Image (cartoon, rainbow, N blue to C red):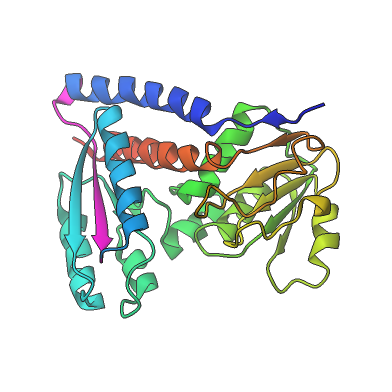
Amino acid sequence: MSAKVLDGKQVSGRIEADLTARVARLKDRIGRTPILATILVGGDPASATYVKMKGNACRRVGMDSIKVELPESTTTEQLLAEIARLNINPDVHGILLQHPVPAQIDERACFDAIALEKDVDGVTCLGFGRMSMGERAYGSATPAGIMSLLSAYDIPLSGRHAVVVGRSPILGKPMAMMLLAANATVTICHSRTQDLPGMVRQADIVVGAVGRPAFIQSDWIKDGAVVVDAGYHPGGVGDIELGGVVSRAFAYTPVPGGVGPMTIATLMRQTVEAGERLIR
């Protein structure tokens, strides 16, 4: 029996339809729309593509966007100054700093400079801490999108053993906290975990978030597991070798078309929420 496909395109389409209606109501009531500011530093083609996709998503739901493009030579101080300007701009409701930034920039300092109420990508330490404690904050967009996708397909999490392979501050760590909040039992693994295959074989839910193409082998995954691949690499390859999984898993996310669309839909949803709170 083939595994259930967790179709991020389909679910994100439903989310965008709801957001379109919410944005229209806001525009009719107040005459303003939520605005997302994106900051792109340097000329990385992949980053430019991601920023363009987010701008397109804004237009699809009727939002406006501001695109800030800075040169490769930008310093930390210059980027902090740009973020400060966006923080105090009442017409900006969400701020996205595209990752990664050039090596000379202190990315963490720049992430943390984003005002909490405009941190719609969920990248600040303050936002992570509040989310981890169950307080109101915007969750990191990719793991929050994964949680929405699992919920849309009624995937049970309570009491299940989830193994997250990856520990990045904007994916692996917040993913683990969100699963824990949903009453899953969570193990965080990474590339240096001893007997990683054995750890993955224990998982009812596997989240590949390690950032290496096909790093997690299909024979590590037990029959009936839920497989979530949060990676995307050239050639349409994720972090998990999916070929041997689709006939044995209970459910899986395709690459592409699984987690990616949910990340963007979550960013749009959180920007609309920020607009609904901030627009007066």
Task: Indicate whether 153 appears above or below 112.
Answer: above
Position in image of residue 10 (x %, y %): 51, 25
Report the residue at 23% width, 72% height from top. Answer: 72
Dividing the picture into quadrants, the one containing residue 56 is top left
Task: Indicate whether 248 appears above or below 87.
Answer: above
Q: Is residue 132 visible?
A: yes
The magenta stretch spans residue 30 = yes
Q: Left or right? Give the position of 265 relative to 180.
A: left
Q: In this orientation, which residue lies closer to the viewer: 27 or 57?
A: 57
The magenta stretch spans residue 244 = no
Q: Is residue 118 visible?
A: no
Report the residue at 15% width, 44% height from top. Answer: 91
Report the residue at 39% width, 22% height from top. Answer: 18
Which residue is outermost to the bottom? 104
Report the residue at 71% width, 57% height from top. Answer: 216
Span colored in magenta:
29-42
Position in image of residue 235 (x %, y %): 52, 50
Position in image of residue 132 (x %, y %): 56, 55
Figure quadrant of the N terminus: top right
Figure quadrant of the C terminus: top left
Q: In this orientation, which residue lies closer to the viewer: 114 or 171?
A: 171
Position in image of residue 203 (x %, y %): 80, 50
Count the marks.
Answer: 0
Q: Left or right? Give the position of 214 relative to 159.
A: left
